Image: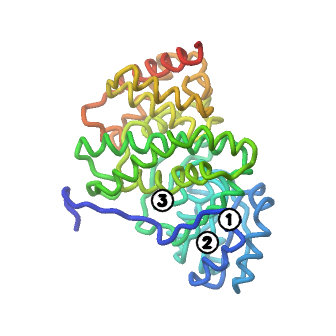
Amino acid sequence: MTTMTTQLFRSPAGYVQGRTVIDDLGDYADDLGSTALVLGDDLVLDLVGDRVRESLESAGFDVALEEFGGECSEREIERVADVHAEYDADVIVGTGGGKAIDTARAARERVGGALVSLPTVASTDAPTSSVAVIYTEDGEFVEFHVYERHPDLVVVDTEVVAEAPTRFFRGGIGDALATWFEADAAYRSGATTIFGTRSTRTAQEIANLAYTTLRDHGRSAVDAVERDAVTESVEAVVEANTLLSGLGFESGGLAAAHAIHNGLTQLEATHEATHGEKVTIGTIAQLVLEGREDAFVEDVAGFAASVGLPTTLAEIGLEDPTRDELSVVAEAACADDETIHNEPFEVTPAAVRDALVGADAIGRRLTDR
C-alpha cells in the first residue's frame, strides 16, 4: 500500500531509438512471444506495415495486420480487444500516432500479453506511458485510464519520424514543452502523480531535461525534419518528445496545461488542432495563471512560435471565441478530477478563462511584431 509520502518511478521495460531500427523489430521483440497483431491506420500500414511484418516474421512470429478506426474510444478498444483475443496474439504492436498506440495499450490490458509501441511520428509522449486517453467517437476528451503495465518495448525509427509531416514533430515539441512546467507545479504543491504517489527527484530532473533539450535543439531539429533529414538535434528532440516527456509527465506530475487541453477539446472548432498544439496553448495559459513574469512567458511563447506552434486561440480554430465558449473550456478544465488542481494554489474556472484571454493576448502581440 502506498502513502502520500511514497515516491514511485515507473517506465517501459525497453526503449530503442535510431535510424532504420524498425527493420530490427523482430530481434528486439523476440523474447515477447510468437504471434503478433499489428494495429495501425491505413496510411501507417501502407507506410510501414510490410517492413513490420517482414521483421517480425524473420524472427519467427506469425503476424496479422489490423486497421485502426481512428479514435481511442471505448467502442474501438472493445473491437480491437476482440480481434486480439480471436487471433490469440502474444504481442500487440501499436503503430502510428498516440491514439492507435493508446488503443493497443487498452486492448492489451483487457486481453493480456505484451505491448510494443512503434510510433511513426514523434507527436506525443504516449508511446512510453501506461496511460490511455479515452475520447468519444467525435474526438472529445472523456478520461484517462492508468494501467499497471507499461509497454514491454518502445521502438522509434527516427528516419520514419523525420519523413512524416513536420506538423506532427512540432506537435510533439508542444506536448513535451508542458512537461517541466507541470511537473514543477505538481512538485511544489505536494501533489501526487497519476500513480497516486509523490514524484521522485529523478523524474523532476528528467522533466527539466526534456525542456532544456527542446530549447537547445528544437529549432534546428524542425529545420532538419522539414527536409526529411535526421541530425543529432533530431535524435535529441525525438528522445525529448517521446522518452523524456513520457517519463517526466507520468512520474513527475501533471498540472494546468493538460487540463486546459482537455477543456479545449470540448469545443468542436478545436478538433482539427493536434494534441500538442492545444497543449501549447494550455502551457502558455498555465504560465499566465501562475503569474509568471511577462518576459518569461513571452520567451516561452516566442520559442513555441519559432518552431511553428500556435500561440493564439485563432490558430487552434477559435477565432474570437465568446466568453461563454471560454467558460465551457474553463469549467471542463476545472472538473473535480482534473490535474489543474495540482497547481500550488486554488484554481477557479473564472481564473482559467481569464488566463486563456491573457495567453491569447500575448500570442497576438508576438504575431503582430
Label 1 and label 3: CA atoms lie apart by 17 Å
Residue 148 left/right relative to 123: left
Q: Is residue 258 above or below residue 312?
A: below
Which residue is rendered at x = 45% and y = 34% of the image?
A: 283
Q: Quadrant of residue 221?
A: top right
Q: Is residue 64 left or right of residue 317?
A: right
- Secondary element under disc 2, as helix, strand or loop, is strand
Colour treatment of the image: rainbow
Residue identified by numbered label 2: 92
Q: Residues within 10 Å of mark 1 (few under 14, many from 20)?
A: many
In the displayed structure, 25 sits above or below 260; it is below
Task: Name the residue nearer the viewer: 186 or 155.
Answer: 155
Identify residue for label 1: 39
Location of mark 3 (residue): 129
Secondary structure beneath disc 3?
loop
The amino acid type found where label 2 is placed reads: Ile
Q: Tell me, yes or no, whether the two marked residues, 1 and 2, touch with CB atoms within 8 Å.
A: yes
